[in-house]
Image (cartoon, rainbow, N blue to C red):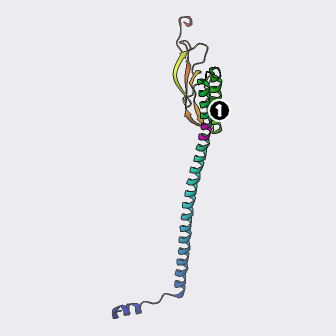
């Protein structure tokens, strides 16, 4: 060191022993907190990766169960087609109905349910009105006919039901006729 630097360090008083001890304690606390932070961050990353892996595995298991069920249904369709080609057409309707029932049961097993439509009040959240018919014997807004089934998965609509709804006659719609005057 140069003489000027030696003189500068000689003029500074040495820190008191308590101050040195306090600084060492704070440094140790800082190091401990940093170590805890690093471990917590690593634990969080591991948890996130494990959760993603679990969600993926569960989704794959659900899909696999659905696919396995559909393969059985395909087997029954193949059998129905072979039976129909051999001339036993009278049993074809029953076979196809059985396959339809199996598909509905498979969907229900996975939480997919048909949306009730006929006779219900039209609900745009679950029904899609494709036509309407004036009917004196039906309350306006009532579903008269289900044209295509709708399905939901829990509260989520997979596909809305396509329906025909009742519209009121002119008198029901608020128009007065000559007899009312």
Q: Is residue 8 above or below residue 65?
A: below
Which percent across, then down, holds residue 74?
Answer: 59, 34
Quadrant housing the N terminus: bottom left
Q: Magenta segment range?
A: 67-71
Instruction: Kindly report the secondary structure that dominates the magenta region of the rendered protein.
Output: helix
Which percent across, then down, holds residue 168?
Answer: 55, 16
Which percent across, then down, holds residue 44?
Answer: 56, 61
Q: Is residue 68 magenta?
A: yes
- Residue at the spot of label 1: 102
Which residue is nearer to you in this view: 83 or 2? 83
Q: Residue furthest front?
A: 86
Quadrant housing the C terminus: top right
Which percent across, then down, holds residue 104?
Answer: 63, 32
Q: Is residue 70 magenta?
A: yes
How packed is label 1: few (under 14 Cα within 10 Å), some, or many (20 or more)?
some
Residue 163 figure quarter: top right
């Amino acid at each position: 060191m140069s003489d000027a630097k030696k003189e500068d360090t000689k003029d500074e008083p040495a820190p008191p022993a308590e101050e040195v001890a306090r600084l060492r304690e704070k440094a140790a606390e800082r190091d401990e907190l940093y170590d805890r932070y690093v471990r917590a961050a690593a634990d969080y990353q591991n948890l996130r990766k494990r959760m993603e892996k679990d969600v993926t595995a569960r989704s794959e298991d659900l899909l696999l169960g659905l696919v396995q069920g559909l393969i059985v249904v395909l087997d029954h369709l193949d059998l129905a087609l072979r039976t129909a080609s051999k001339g036993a057409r009278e049993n074809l309707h029953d076979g196809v109905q059985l396959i339809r029932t199996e598909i509905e049961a498979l969907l229900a097993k996975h939480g997919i349910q048909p949306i009730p439509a006929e006779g219900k009040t039209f609900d745009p959240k679950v029904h899609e009105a494709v036509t309407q018919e004036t009917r004196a014997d039906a309350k306006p807004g009532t579903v008269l006919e289900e044209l295509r089934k709708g399905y939901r998965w829990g509260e989520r609509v997979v596909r809305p039901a396509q329906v025909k709804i009742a519209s009121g006659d002119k008198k029901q719609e608020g128009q007065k006729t000559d007899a009312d005057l």
